[in-house]
Amino acid sequence: MGVMKVTSLFAFLILAVAAHGQTADAPAEKKAPVPSTKVIPPDINGYKTIIAPPENPAPLKIAIFEGKGAPGGGIENVCAKVELMPGSTITRLKPEEIASGGLKGYDVVVFSGGSGSAQAASLGDEGREKVREFVKDGGGYVGICAGAYLACSNFSWGLGILNASTVSSKWMRGSGYMDAEVTVDGAPILGPVEGVFKVRYNNGPIIKPGTRADLPAYRPLALFRSEVANNGTPAGVMVNSPAQAVSTFGKGRVFISSPHPENTPGLEHLIPRGIYWAAGKLAEKPLVHMP
């Protein structure tokens, strides 16, 4: 009887293990979470090229910040898009290189996603001043997500090269694919895109006009048409706020993007267009038709 019970119990365990697809002494497989930045549906914009490449682009010499607050994945995404810019090169510069005048000779500096405050701390006072001097003297600045925060004028640690403030100190809104739409001002730079498109968003700044009397107003190029508002962040402030915006600082140009077009199918040419514009090498075509 005891043998029958043991045999029956053994058979039950075999059946149970088979049902779960693993051996009795093997632990259950643990799947590592996949970062949201890597999960990109290839058809998010319906296999369409939403933003077209610019015509007859000039070769540019581009620098990109590489330091604390700028994870490698974000840098790689930008570098991959620069490969779509014929003849252009991109060089990674450490904060100490920027602080020692390393931006000299470049057309544009790019600050990618990550943490704006960490990028600012990594640059230090001297590095931030060198970035301001570079733009003021005619260089271009492109800030994506964290780089957009860094450009704003309402943070003690910011560069203060864009007359913009964030609408709330609560920044952890969440992530997802937001609807966006090109504005009348944006069409000459981004192209005459009709209707809304999708763009990846991950806690980027929601901005409003700043209060600096010594800085010009920014121009929104595209507006958010949907929003995410998690973690107690204010709802109703993201829709119709700028997704991308441009302005000037001294002799230079500033282009910022709250979301991540460099990591969104169909928008591969948006950041390159921003880089060309910031360098003063993008011919802004007059608006022909917008619905």
Image: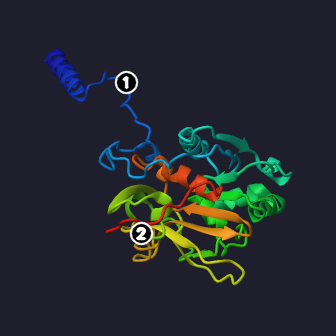
Q: Residues within 10 Å of mark 2 (few under 14, many from 20)?
A: some
Left or right, 44 with respect to 167, comes to left
- The image quadrant where one finds the C terminus is bottom left
- The image quadrant where one finds the N terminus is top left
Q: Is residue 91 above or below residue 275?
A: above
- Report whether residue 156 is seen: yes
**Residue 164: which disc?**
none
Residue shown at 67% from the left, 74% from the top = 153
Residue 44 spot, x, y in % from top left: 33, 49
Q: Name the amino acid, label 2.
A: Ala
Residue 17 spot, x, y in % from top left: 25, 25
Q: Is residue 7 above or below residue 32?
A: above
Looking at the rendered image, the disc whose residue lies closer to the viewer, 2 or 1, is 2
Quick one: SS at disc 2? loop
Foreground pick, 62 / 146? 62
Q: Name the amino acid, label 1.
A: Ala
Foreground pick, 135 / 97? 135
Left or right, 128 with respect to 265, comes to right
Residue shown at 80% from the left, 57% from the top = 127
Q: How many marks?
A: 2
Residue 110 spot, x, y in % from top left: 65, 52
**Residue 229: which disc?**
2
Residue shown at 40% from the left, 43% from the top = 39
Q: Residues within 10 Å of mark 1 (few under 14, many from 20)?
A: few
Query: Mark 1 sits on what residue?
Result: 26
Quick one: SS at disc 1? loop
